[in-house]
Amino acid sequence: MKDKYSIWLGMTVLALILTACSKDDDMPSTSMATVTIENVLDSKSLVESGSFKNTGASPVIMPGESVSIKFSAAKGQALSFATMYGWSNDLFFAPANPGIILYQENGTPIEGDVSAQIKLWDNGTRINQKPGAAVMHPGTAESTPKAVTAVNGTDAQGNTYAMASSLMKTSLHYDGNSFFTLTISNVSGATSNPTPFSPGVWAISYIAGGNLLNPNPLFEAGKLSANGLTNIAEMGDNIVLANYLTTQTGIFTPLSPVLVVVYKGIENPIYKVGENDRGRGLKDLAQKGDAAGLAAYLKTVPGVKAAYVLPAASTTVLLPKISGQPGGRVSQQLNVSNGDRLAITTMYGLSNDWFFASKDNGIDATTKGDVSSSMGLFDNGTAINQFPGAGNAQAGLGGTPVSESKPIGEVPNPNTFTTLPSIANMIKVTIN
C-alpha cells in the first residue's frame, strides 16, 4: 500500500511540474529591441541636366536655326545653359547664375521672350581675335588663364560685340505640370556679329530649405573655368562638361519624421496596396510629411500596441548624405513579444505623395539585423505626380498638391520622371 501511495504521489508531483512547465511555455516572451532608421541616400545637387545640339546634318546651330530643351522645375529653381559663340576664340553664351528665372514671385510660370537674361562671357583661356569666320582655332593661349568675365560690348582686346539678346533669342513655353520648353534661336545672321552656336549643356539645381544646392552649376563669374566648360568655349565640344554634369545629377530627398508602429493580431494598420487611402492620416504623411494624425488614429486601433513619431534631432527631417556627411538617423527602443509585428513609414520628402513603408504585413518585431529589404516605395494616389524635386505642387517645395484619387501602389523604377536608386540605397532599417 505504501509503495502504491509513493508511486501515486510521485506521479502527481511530476504532473504538477509538467503543468507548470507548460504554463511557463505559454507565457509571452518579452524583450527589448531598438529600431534605427537612416537616410543613406548619397545625394546629388542637380535634379536634371543634359546636352543639346542641332538635329540636322550638322550639330552646329547656324543663323536661322533653333533647338529646344524640355525640363521640369519648381518655383525658385532656374535653368542654366552654355553654348559657344562659334566664331570666337573662347566666348560662350549663358544666363547669369543661377540661370533663367522660371516663375514670378506669385508662382505663375513665366512664358515668352527671356532673351534679356542671356549674356556673352569670356572663358579667359584664349587671346581674343576679331570675331568672325576668319578666327583661327584654337588660337593663342593666355599666358595665365583668367577668370570668366562678362563681355559687355567689348572684350579685353577691344573687339566689339552686339548685345547677346540680339544674337540669341530664348523663349519659354509652359507645358503644364511644372514642365517647360526653352527654345534657343540663332538670330545673329542680320547683326554685326553673325555666328554659329555650338552644341551645349544645361542643368537645374535642387532647392532645399529655400536655397539652391548648386547655384553655379556650369561656371562662376570671377573664377577660373572648370569641369569641361573650356572645351565648349574653345572648341564647341560639350562632351566633357556633359559627362561631369551627369556625375552631379540624381536624387536628393529628405525623409519626414518616421512613424513606427508595433501591432499584433491584425494586418498592417497603415495601408494596403490596391486600396485607396483610408482617410486616417496617411495622406498628410505622404503629401506633407506630417505623421501626427495617423499616429493618433493608430493608437485607437485594437491590436496596435504602440505608435511612435520620430523626428531627427535639430533638423526634424532626416537629410540625405551631403558632401560626404552622414545622413540623418532616428532610433526608438521597443518592448516586443512573440507574435508582434512592426511597420514603418516616412515620406519621400521631395515628391507629391510618395512614401516609404514596410511591405505587406510588416515584419516580425523580434527580428534582428538589417531589415531594409522589407521596405518599399509607394504612391499614395491622392496627388498628381510631378518630377520628384522639381514640381511646383510639391509641399516640400512650398506648393499645394493637386488632388487625384487612385489606389495605393508601388512606385515604378524607372518611372516616367527619373530612375531611382535601390530602396536599400535610400533608406536603411536595422533592429538590434
Image (cartoon, rainbow, N blue to C red):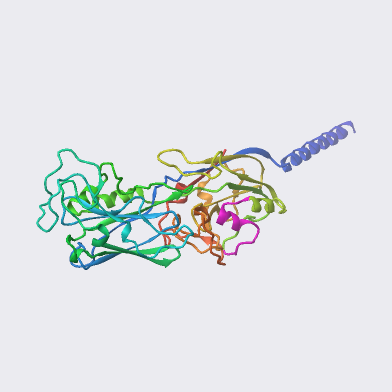
Q: Is 143 placed above or below 236 here?
A: above
Q: Give the dominant element type of the magenta stretch: helix, strand or loop.
A: loop
Indicate whether residue 289 is drawn in magenta: yes
- Percent coordinates x, y for residue 270 in the rendering: 62, 55
Indicate whether residue 177 is drawn in magenta: no
> In this picture, which residue range is highlighted in magenta?
274-291
Q: Disc count in the image?
A: 0
- Percent coordinates x, y for residue 353 in the rendering: 53, 58
**What residue lies at 59% left-to-right and 54% top-to-bottom?**
285
98 vs 344, left or right, is: left
Towards the viewer: 338 or 132: 132
Towards the viewer: 362 or 175: 175
The answer to whether residue 62 is visible is: no
**What residue lies at 11% left-to-right and 59% top-to-bottom?**
133
159 vs 318, left or right, is: left
**What residue lies at 45% left-to-right and 46% top-to-bottom?**
41
- Percent coordinates x, y for residue 1 in the rendering: 90, 33
The answer to whether residue 176 is visible is: yes
Towards the viewer: 386 or 113: 113
- Percent coordinates x, y for residue 340 in the rendering: 66, 47
Give the residue at the far right of this rendering. 1
Q: Quadrant of the C terminus?
A: top right
